[in-house]
Image (cartoon, rainbow, N blue to C red):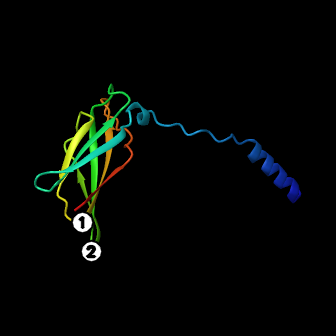
Amino acid sequence: MNKSLFITLFFSFFYLNCNPPEAIVEPSHSTRVPVAVNLQATKDTTDTGKARISLTWTVSDMTNIRTFEVQRAVSVFDKTGKVTKYNPMQPPVTTTSIVDSFTITSDTTYAYYSVVPTGKDRFIGKASDTLQVIFTK
């Protein structure tokens, strides 16, 4: 068998017998728990100078919502560079709002928040978009 005939037969057999790519099916658990949207913050300071942040968000349907886990990361920028501290907010909440408070330790402090819903069927939903809140002394 000559080389060009072999290549033609090889190409025809493998290429023509391939199925077209199939779409990736999104797992059902990622859509059965509604995503928290419209994450908003109102910032203030307490009488003692701590940061106080009131967070609110919405979901399209509360039917399959068990709790919301609010996640926070605080970044401090000072003369030594960036220091990031991750603090889980405990316990998870059952409402669409929470008030957070922490000590402002430098001239500029950035707080990052996201909300992760957990369904009554114990499936964990997608995290909300991250919200950045900036405090300056």
Q: Position of residue 43 (x, y in %)?
A: 24, 49
Q: Quadrant of residue 125?
A: top left
> For the point 17% across and 58% down, which residue is it?
103
Q: Position of residue 12 (x, y in %)?
A: 80, 46
**What numbered label is drawn on residue 80?**
2
The residue carrying mark 1 is 107
Left or right of 113: which side holds 28? Answer: right
Seen in the picture, residue 16 relative to 119 is either above or below; the reply is below
Farthest bottom residue in view:
80
Separation of marks 1 and 2 at Cα, in angstroms: 12 Å
- Say what secondary structure mark 2 lies in: loop
**Amino acid bearing label 1:** Asp
Q: Quadrant of residue 73?
A: bottom left
- Tell which of 135 and 38 is nearer to you: 135
Left or right of 9: which side holds 137? Answer: left
Left or right of 12: which side holds 106? Answer: left
- Say what secondary structure mark 1 lies in: loop
Farthest left residue in view:
48
Q: First in sequence: mark 1 or mark 2? A: 2
**Amino acid bearing label 2:** Thr
- Tell which of 99 and 62 is nearer to you: 99
> For the point 86% across and 59% down, which residue is it?
3
